[in-house]
Amino acid sequence: MSIELLAPAGSPEALDAAVGEGADAVYLGLKNFNARMRSANFTYSRFEGALRALRRMGKKIYVTVNTVFEQREVDRMYQLLKYLAGLGPDGLIVQDFGVAAMVRDCFPSLKLHASTQMNIASARGANALSRRGVCRVVLARELALEEIQGIRANTNMELEVFVHGALCVSVSGVCLFSSYRGGKSANRGMCTQACRRRYGNEDEGGYYFSPSDLQLLEKVPGLAAAGVNSFKIEGRMKSAEYVGAVTSAYRRVIDAVSEGGEEKIRESIRQGREILRNDFARAKTFFYFDGPPAAPESPAEPQPPSKTPDSAPQTPALDWLNPAQDGGTGVNLGPLLKVKGAGPERRGLISAGAFPAAFSLPSAGDSIRLHRFDDSDRKSHKLVSVEPFTADGLPHAWISIPEGFEPGDGVYLIQTRAMGKRYTPVIPKDLDGFKRRPGRDKAPPLELAPARRGAAPFPEGIYAAISRIEDMYILQSSRPARLMLSYTRKAAAYLLGKGRSPLPFKPEEIMLVLDPFFPQAMEQPLGEEIPALLERGYRQFVINNPGHASFFRAAAPGREKPLLAAGPYLYIFNRWAEQFVCSLGAEAFVSPLENNRQNLEKTVSRNRRSLAFVTVFARPALFRIRADLSPVYRFRDFSGSRGERFTLISGPEGSQVLPEKPFSIVDKIPFLREAGFGRFILDLSGPPLKKAAYRDLMNAVKESLPLPGVSRFNWKDGFYQEAAQGE
């Protein structure tokens, strides 16, 4: 099997570096609908020039269309896909099920690759997409080699795996932090990297959630043996120099693996690590590669860190989180010791005694990043002048700095002038012949079948979601139309026979909510438990991952068919996505937590609103983290730089970060009822539920009263919008 080395091309210069260092394929974004809207991206003419040049070289080009789109953007998405279908790139990397449905129905010549944002971590998830026209899946990054091997053994799909670059602390595709803080959604390519920020608790502050960078150079032989088709480098926001260096390192190892010979492979890894030693990125980690977190059935105990690359941080239980490590990239040159001057004459003093011996003082033309001590500002700066001198036996230098930075602020070297390497340009200079643009076509109308009159699958009313069996007893005081219970390992044990007392709700009154992260390791437990649950009368489930649907494809003979609702993490932001999710077997769906009223009403036609659930109260999980962080962080509550308060909940099944300020639109229920919606979720999962809090919330619902101290999330203002850039 040939192994593809896939490199990022966030700019034409990065494209040149990737190709110059031997990438087999590149991935890039255009000006809209891609998950790196803050990168340079490609104009249409440059994209077409690159496409033609790469075809002549025998290399492949994949286009990222990996964000969700709203119903009002249907025509624009259709126009973009039609434009791409006319050119025929080698693949489209997509997140939105609506994009997948539109391609399948309207542009079947386009090859679909499921983005890592689709959160596919199991063979069942891959196969569910394969049956709907997807030919490759970019696996979630939170997987161990053993799990990847299990996926390969149970699917024929092409598998693409990230091997190098920045990581997200949250499980792929389910981070809501940036969106909650101001509508800049990671699912819309506008992530503000909340995980890289500094936070504090009553004892100390730190970069609690800023992970190290992935480096699997040493693991390439194992991944190749596991049958991975494509090795992907992250970095569409990175410089051409970075892309060239990383591509070069992995090219050496992949070639050595293909040629064979243990000594040759060892030498290629040594050479590759030397190339990567000064890549000006963060400390390195293998992440979960050597093994997933402790099995949920047993309490997680602190473990010594596994052997990692030399620069990996060492924490009590995880090698990829270090709260003392700044969330940015670059070589730490220490703090500014003094500052003088103003405007273009502004200068800051640094000392070579503050940074690694492997690095000398920077030179004019090098690039640095300055970082305010309180994390309030970060800025990149190309050094105009460097004035070196010796003091106390150590090299010092006055360096040019921009306004706004003072003594104590950090300085990081992010690129040296010497790093610059000239590559042959891929895109031709003359672009006059490339004049195609998306047209003004209207997308074909998509009208889904109306809900059957009088036969809505779920009753109207208030639905209460909880994550603890104990909270059921509190809900008895004001019983909801249905109880929605998070299907945790503890809940599974209780429902399947280990519970010592009868529950206050019957199985037919309970909907079981499956977790959005569905790794290969959970296939066997769920495959055994779901039939047992059906036998016990639990017939209503909320699925949050494409792989979940396969457990319900065939109902047991003589038994009532299970009722499925698509959860908020299947992201139905448009009618095409609604159609796709219906094909999975869902008969109703929960509107995404990030959604807004205008888009909800545009997406769901009036004759289908009896099939839609609207969450009206929640403390949404801003981060959902696979690892148990309790061995690392003993605190529960912490704060951000804007004074916001958050809660960290950790346990054997992972960790979540919740906002102190809940999302609430309970006072809008009457207006939603007028609009035809009748199923409302109070999401009370997270911390233990208190009787008084539940009583007050239900009173507010009954009286349609606004709650104090809450967030409207994106309900009123919608997503942050940034004007599309032209040529």
Image (cartoon, rainbow, N blue to C red):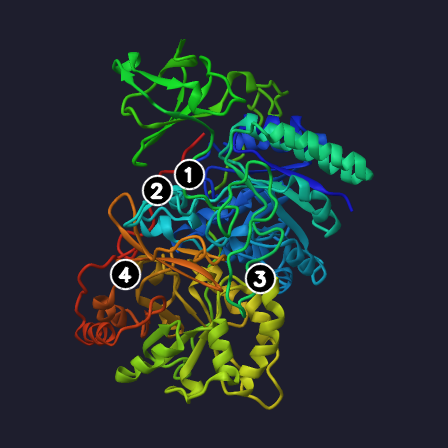
For numbered disc 3, what is the local secondary structure?
loop
For mark 1, what is the residue? 327
| Label 4 CA crowd tier, 10 Å (few <14, some 14–19, many 20+) | some
Residue 631 is left or right of residue 658, and the answer is right
Q: Position of residue 417 (x, y in %)?
A: 51, 16
Question: Which residue is the extreme one toward the front?
Answer: 392
CA separation in Å, label 1 and label 4: 27 Å
Q: What mark, if any, has residue 617 been given in the picture?
A: none
Q: Position of residue 118 (x, y in %)?
A: 53, 55
Sequence order check: which comes first, mark 1 or mark 4? Answer: 1
Sequence order check: which comes first, mark 4 or mark 2? Answer: 2
Q: What mark, if any, has residue 662 been given in the picture?
A: 4
For mark 2, what is the residue? 198
Sequence order check: which comes first, mark 2 or mark 1? Answer: 2
For numbered disc 4, what is the local secondary structure?
loop
CA separation in Å, label 4 and label 2: 22 Å
For mark 3, what is the residue? 519
